[in-house]
Image: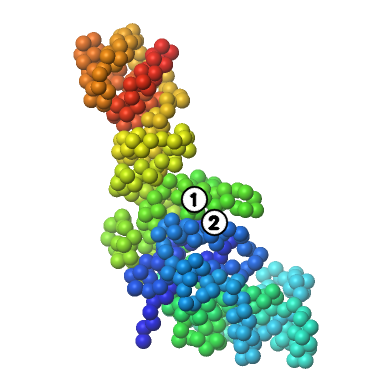
Amino acid sequence: MNRPVRTRFAPSPTGGLHLGGVRTALYNFLFTRKHGGTFVLRIEDTDQTRFVPGAEEYIIKCLEWCGITPDESTTAGGNYGPYRQSERKHLYAQYAQQLVAAGHAYYAFDTPEELAQMRAANANQQYDHTIRMQMRNSLVLPDTEVATLLAQGVPHVIRIKMTPGETLTFTDLIRGEISFDTSLVDDKVLLKADGMPTYHLAVVVDDYLMQITHAFRGEEWLPSAPVHLLLWEYLGWKEKMPDWAHLPLILKPDGYGKLSKRDGQRLGFPVFAMNWTDPATGETMTGFCERGFLPEAFVNMLAMLGWNDGTTQEIFSLEELVQAFSLERVHKAGAKFDFEKAKWFNQQYIQQASDDVLVLLVRPYIEEHVGEVTDELLWQVVPLIKERCSLLADFWDQGHFFFKDPETIDVDAIREKWNDSTQQFFTAWLEALDQLEVWSAESVERSFNELVAAQGIKKGAVMLPLRIMLVGGKYGPGVFEIAGVVGKEAVVRRLRRNLFSV
Ligand code: GLU
């Protein structure tokens, strides 16, 4: 009988949320929504050495920004909690002990020095079937000594006992059948000396107890799959094992290697969903959100990093993604990250967004530079420049002159066009502008054209200087529209300032 679909996103709160992590959450979410299931957010914080304060709240905030809403989580609650593994600590030891009792795991008392010695001869030596009988563990020590060591509380871990020479197979929903040779897998620690489970034990126990039916995770977890397969089997839960899918890596733009947290800084684009400040170093890494991405565009772009629906369609709303998504169409090969393409997605969404939404979104990017601005002004500016913007931050670069006089002026470009007649033209036009009763893009343009005609001057000779005096350079939307928005006072001031300095 088919069980109701339950999936999970299981991040470790160790720092910023990499776009690969968000994509894993997204694919889980899309699959779950498509199948009317339940999407669980589980915080995997059993590694105390890697725990970073604030990272859990940050992950929740990032998912919220993306619209990837968990049905069960530390904040939403649910019937399978707690959803933070450190709060489930008491649950895991019994399963590790059950494995020891059944001969599938053993106590290991090796000290850090003994482990270092093991590796001294061969740095690649793993704690595995080739060496375990030379180490200090319950496979080797007499039962009475093991009992004494345990009674004395001597620090120890519990390791899985891998049986060498077997082939383990499972069917990955993306990659098909995958086999592993157990001889190559080491005896992974399941329960640590501090009583905390490792990822391997915790992920199996929790996927079982939370009745997870489908587990999609990054490709980097594939080598751990044989350990997990055996744990499902040894714990007697094999029938309940979720279907797994290992998602392809997100690669550096050149395709060589996994896109790392550092690559973004090196190459000048974000890799985290939102700004992340490392509490230890105080260093902030920019997020897609703060860089000016719309969450819908970010999510759409991520969905396409490793998946398509078989057509050439690229723009999908979240609802459309839910309908169209299928694991069969997730690629096996890694997906190259292309920041220009990511910006293209964002540009598409900026063009589609309504002006009232954009006014809200753009405001902080403008106010960051000039303090408070009125809605009225933003309402005028946004439609004039939105087609030139790929990022929300571009609204400042493309439209700063609407909010303050340009700081730099491309004087050389004006000089190229400048002569006595242009000087006369602008001097006369300043007077004409002063007489203008109604100030609008149309009235300004009319007065300009009338004077061009009256002076018999070429329009092209004065248009460019006008633009540069108003804007600072050879860019921006229609020059009369700019004049209409910034108003008479600003136009007159900018012309005066530049007219007599060229
Ligand atoms: N805690 C693991 C991680 O952060 C989760 C892996 C999994 O989904 O099983 O990648």
The residues bearing labels 2 and 1 have C-alpha atoms spaced at a distance of 9 Å
Pointer 1: what residue?
A: 287
Q: Residue at x 58, y 78 (%)?
A: 201
User: Where is residue 498 shown, x and y percent of the image?
Assistant: 41, 16
Mark nearer the N terminus (2 vs 1): 2
Three-letter amino acid code at the position of disc 2: Gly
Label placed on residue 278: none
From where the camera sits, is residue 191 visible?
yes
In-front residue for pair 199/142: 199
Image quadrant assignment for residue 444: top left
User: Where is residue 132 shown, x and y percent of the image?
Assistant: 70, 82
Q: Residue at x 49, y 50 (%)?
A: 287
Quadrant for the N terminus in the image: bottom left
User: Where is residue 30 shown, x and y percent of the image?
Assistant: 37, 66
**Is the residue at mark 2 in contact range of ligand 1, meaning its CB lies under 8 Å from it?**
no
Pointer 2: what residue?
A: 16
Q: Residue at x 26, y 17 (%)?
A: 436
Three-letter amino acid code at the position of disc 1: Gly
User: Where is residue 55 shown, x and y percent of the image?
Assistant: 56, 59
Q: Residues within 10 Å of mark 2 (few under 14, many from 20)?
A: many
